Image (cartoon, helix red, strand yellow):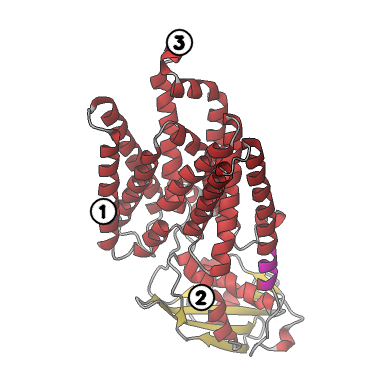
Amino acid sequence: MSELFSADFLFRNAILGGLGVALLCSLLGIYLVLRRLVLIGVALPQASAAGIAAVFWLTGHGHAGGADTHLIALAASLGATFTALGLLVAGQRRARSPAEWGVGALFAISSAATILFVAINPKGDIEMAGLLRGELLAITDGDLRLVAGVLLAVGSLFFLFRRDLLLTSFDPEFSRTLGREPVRYDLLLYLLIGGGIALGVMMTGPLVVFGFLVLPALAALRVAPGLVAAFCISAAVAALSFLGGFWISYQADLPAGPACVAVAGACWAASSFLMRLRVRRGAAALLLLLAALGLTQGCASRFEAAAQRAASPLPRGTLPESLLPHPIAVLPFSNATGQSLTIPQGFLDDVARAMGSQTAQRRYTVPDALQQRAAFELERRGYQVVVVPVEQKRTLLAGEPLAAAGAGAPAGFTGPVLAGKLRRFTLTGSGLLLVQLDLALIDSQSQDVLWSGAAQRPVPIPSALTWQEILLDAGAPIFADAFGNR
């Protein structure tokens, strides 16, 4: 399991961030199911997605989205969720018609609005389509900190007000006689539900949020001997479903979100089957928990093996073997495409940037990602690598590789440097990535070109929807072409 928490693990953010959202939803889902608010759990994530899609359309969000676009999108997600929740609650208190009517109308309107905003937005369709499909690879370090903070806050509030929430949820009249006004604790519960849904949709999409709001809670309540056990079992089922589904999606190249929800559905079906066999609740719960622990260990070992396979040595291609004893400094790549090629980042980075933080002024770009991938590919071919920080990018000349090598070599560095210029990076409608990347290995002292290569072949990426997925799928073929060992 320590491999999952390693900062160098390729899928660390996706696993930890998605797992945090799954655990958060599994706790909130117990109250949704017990209070018969499951349909609200359907409509609210869709309303949140509509708010995000509206912001992407209004701001012209796309591959070069503004620095504050994701922060505005998170605010829109919160606003749309709480607005929809307020309308539903007010409608339930005043209207004579069944509550399901309003929930169904909200779901239909939100779904239509989301699709229309995506259809008329020519720039943000990739990010929004990935969000609706439930992809997880775009989760950043800032998102992880945000999920951890929200999960800690929700868990603390649930623990501190557990008795009041339960009492006002299932016996409001008795709670009034004890001096506990049900409306106050209902507002607290709705605040937790709305905030958790808005945050989860922004990171993992409405499908994942709704699936983990309902399925782990249903499975836990079928087999749990008590309410405290139901919370624990729901969290365990969520962990099992997420890790198992993520491993299935990795092995079969499937969308991670739907795969995780499918495994959660299988857990619910298994719990229902156990109860139909008249297995005692305690025994059935133990079986589910053992399955969760077993599959979690199995998934961790599979990911570790996959990471070891990804780091296995590769042929050197046309790279000179004489440079093996010398470390290579990989300079920040220059951008000659005429596009900013900005990769959307996390919400906390946007907040820090909006507040003037000096540590959050730089936006992560495609050339930055390709620089990191180049260092990784060189290490796989047996070379020693020194990555020049992207913060030094402003000191580099945007011209030819020789000038970049002279300006960008680290102080006191006398070995070879790798300079790169990205000339084209275009995604076609047929699932092809058109790339032109020029690379050169240069002696930092004599300025002699020791080796040069280029990636010019189209790269097929049919299953990639987010820019993080595109770079992940296309990285190996790009450098296999440039280094001459496709």
Residue 94 screen position, x and y as percent: 24, 25
Q: Position of residue 218 (x, y in %)?
A: 50, 41
Which stretch did the figure color magenta? Answer: 304-309
Disc assigned to residue 249? none
Q: Amino acid at mark 3?
A: Gly
Left or right: 81 as drawn, with respect to 26: left
If you read the primary sequence from the N terminus, does the residue marked by circle 1 or circle 3 appear first? Answer: 1
**Residue at the disc numbered 3:** 179
* Disc nearer the start of the sequence (2/1): 1
Query: In this orientation, does residue 38 appear?
Result: yes
Q: Which residue is at a point 63% across and 41% down the rendered structure image?
A: 284
Q: In this figure, which residue is indicated by the disc labeled 2?
A: 474
Q: Amino acid at mark 2?
A: Ala
Q: Is residue 65 above or below residue 44?
A: below
Which mark, by number, is residue 112? 1
Q: Is residue 142 visible?
A: no
What is the spatial separation of the Cα atoms under label 1 and label 3, in whole angstroms? 44 Å
* Disc 1 residue type (three-letter): Ala
Question: Between 12 and 380, which is closer to the camera in this rendering?
Answer: 12
Q: Main secondary structure of the magenta part?
A: helix
